[in-house]
Amino acid sequence: MEQVPIVKIGQTLFVSIQVELEDQSVLRLQEDLADELATSGARGVIIDITAVEIVDSFIGRMLTMIGSISRLFDAETVIVGMRPAVAITLTELGLSLKGVRTALNAEKGLEILNGRP
């Protein structure tokens, strides 16, 4: 199981998922991100899923859960780089990623976190 790196830049945590997402790696990411939010005081989280080609209901729920965890630490989550097929799959599964914003890319995600439309 590979660990997904979490990089802090300013007040934002960047998570770039470049590995095949398995249930255990998603759970570990959730725990690692909660630890990092608690220790860093970051105000925003950007999760880049550009490399993610396939999602299932478990991964979709975990992305929503990450958004909920972030809010508990007073941080906002933006998912960037979602492929059309992933968006379609999440919709077909009935998952709306409540509490998580989306953007086309990391630059647009930063604009959302910095309060610019």
Image (cartoon, helix red, strand yellow):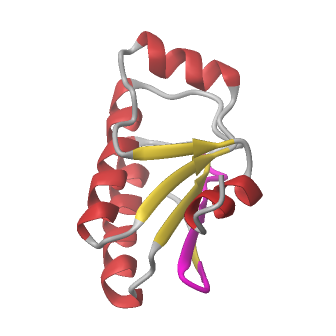
Residue at point 50% right, 65% down?
A: 45
Say whether residue 109 is magenta: no
- Tell me which corner region of the image, top left, top right, bottom left or bottom right, holds residue 16: bottom right
Q: Is residue 9 left or right of residue 107?
A: left
Furthest-left residue in view? 72
Q: Where's residue 106, x and y in %?
A: 71, 57
What range of the chain is rendered magenta? 8-19
- Check residue 12 for magenta coloring: yes
The quadrant holding residue 22 is top left
Count of marks, rendered view = 0
**Front-lying residue, 29 or 112:** 112
For this view, does 116 lie left or right of residue 93? right
Q: Is residue 35 visible?
A: yes
Residue 20 location (% of width, % of height): 58, 43
The quadrant in which residue 8 appears is bottom right
Measuring from the top left, give residue 9's x and y in whole percent: 63, 82
Residue at 50% in and 28% down: 55
Q: Is residue 33 left or right of residue 17?
A: left
Tell me if residue 76 comes above or below residue 74 in the rendering.
above
